[in-house]
Image: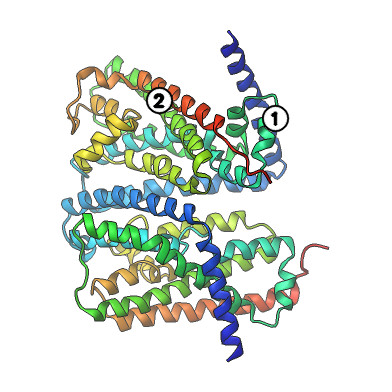
Amino acid sequence: MAERGVLLEGVRAYRLIAGMWVRSSMAYRTSFVVTVFGNLTVTALDFVGILLMFSQVDSLGGWSLPEVALLYGLSATSFGIADLVLGSMDVLGARMRDGSFDTLLVRPVPVLAQVGADRFALRRLGRITQGTVVLGWALVSVDVDWSVLKVLLVPVMVVSGAAIFSAVFVAGAAFQIYAQDAAEVQNAFTYGGTTLLQYPPSVFGKDLVRGVTFMLPLAFVNWVPAVYVLGRPYPVGLPGWAAFASPPVAVACCVLAGLAWRTGLRSYRSTGS
Amino acid sequence: MGSGRLYAAVAAGGFRRYATYRAATVAGVFTNTVFGVILVYTYLALWDEKPHLGGYDQAQAVTYVWLGQCLYATLAIQGGGAEKDLMDRIRTGEIAVDLYRPADLQLWWLAGDMGRAMFQMLGRGVVPFLFGALFFPMALPTTLTPWAAFVVTLLLATVVSFAIRYLAALSVFWLLDGMGVNQVLVITGIFFSGMVLPLNAFPGVFGEVVRVLPWAAQIQMPADVLMGETDPLRAFAFQAAWAVALLAAGRLLQSAATRRVVVQGG
């Protein structure tokens, strides 16, 4: 019961802090519109890169453009959601360096909610919008024999994917407590992860695919379920039910990330300045 | 003579400043290596589908990837070099102090950025490149001449990169906020430098245009010189022409800014 109280309190605090940042960014409306547009363009470049590749070839690793677009749309949308909710966590290292992290610790609000909502940036809707557009296009143009199960799997992928990426962000934040200046390592797993998942698994080496399936289960964001939807083989042997395993995998990731965060927080030593 | 020593000292300062953050450097090396691995696999799949795309074979495409990761921080492809500090100083009005210094504003910042680039190259660029050479087949020259030419193109590339970012930073004299310009720098830098795809693999007229823009001087030219895909003298001329033109434009804009604009702050 107490756990639940903390959770609700955290969500409420998150909403309040995020709302404050939204109001502050809305103070300069033109600037806000320009940055949303800029964010949309920057993220769209990834996809333009894929389009450029497909202007030269008809398939990549045996996958057609709509199929790759499906992977891209799923990866970008779920990453976009996680990035909107927790994407400002990379300022955590800076907060620990300048000592302002200590202020967050003495407030009667869950630290994770404060850190997550810190510098909440609505402009990140740009990435979600762009991902959703590509996903929509992919869904209508991809050649799939749709069943109820496959249709249901699409929203499940987006939500579980967002949860898995959120877990990566939280684990990264926990890592920053130890590493401080090394915040950029997180980018390898967040931005690197979403880039990796935009391409077909058949493109990559088997060891790499094994790694992101069994060790850091990013593959459950889109690869594993999407392979089922498209009726393609997965490069690494997996049981049939694995396609539906994304939600439990996401929950497990979140639990582990939460534990890592708590451990990290407990071992935090202030700079003392 | 004296002024030469001054700019050397500024460059050394730029080098030392970035060398301070060791953990951040190691983190950057790791991230560039991970991105390199991801890109290599996608490029290999692409070149598998279409061998000799853009005149490269697979080993050359792989070399291009790792060179891109090596130069990513060195040339501040996404911004984040001298122009970031310069923008801040213009915004806060601290630029007034810089204008009072008995040194040339453009050369001062160029020297600092060269120092930064030098550190990023040695501290952050070399290791991912060596990692790539160790684990993937690369097309590297075995004689000394291409490497020597490569060093020259790198120097020129750094100057062109600075000249572009210097122009962007000066715009803050009028815009007062660098956020939008920074976004433009990110977009143009990543796309037109060929971080997404080598410029010689861009299709049609679009490709022709992209290959003569100043950003082509940043990764494409050094890559082509290193792998003997272009005449080094032609590459030097291309880079030098853009460097001179952009630095001159920077000077013009700088004199307009310092004559007409009122510095912010009180």
Whether residue B110 is visible here, answered yes or no, is no
**Front-most of B54 and A172?**
A172
Residue A84 to residue B62: above or below: above
Tell me the SS state at disc 2: helix
Chain to which the residue tagged by mark 1 belongs? A
Residue B50 coordinates in the image, percent (x, y): 17, 54
Total marks placed: 2
Q: Type of residue at label 1?
A: Val
Q: Residue furthest bottom?
A: B1
Q: Is label 1 on the same chain as label 2?
A: yes
Residue A242 to residue A67: above or below: above
Q: Tell me the residue that label 1 is attached to.
A: A106
Q: Tell me the residue that label 2 is attached to.
A: A253
Q: Residues within 10 Å of mark 2 (few under 14, many from 20)?
A: many
**Front-most of B81 and A170?**
A170
Residue A269 coordinates in the image, percent (x, y): 59, 38
| x 38%, y 39%: residue | A194
Q: Residue furthest top?
A: A1
Tell me the SS state at disc 1: helix
Q: Type of residue at label 2?
A: Cys
Quadrant assignment for the N terminus of chain A? top right
| x 32%, y 48%: residue | A51
**Front-most of A206 and A42?**
A206
Residue B224 coordinates in the image, percent (x, y): 28, 71
| Separation (CA) of disc 1 from disc 2 | 28 Å
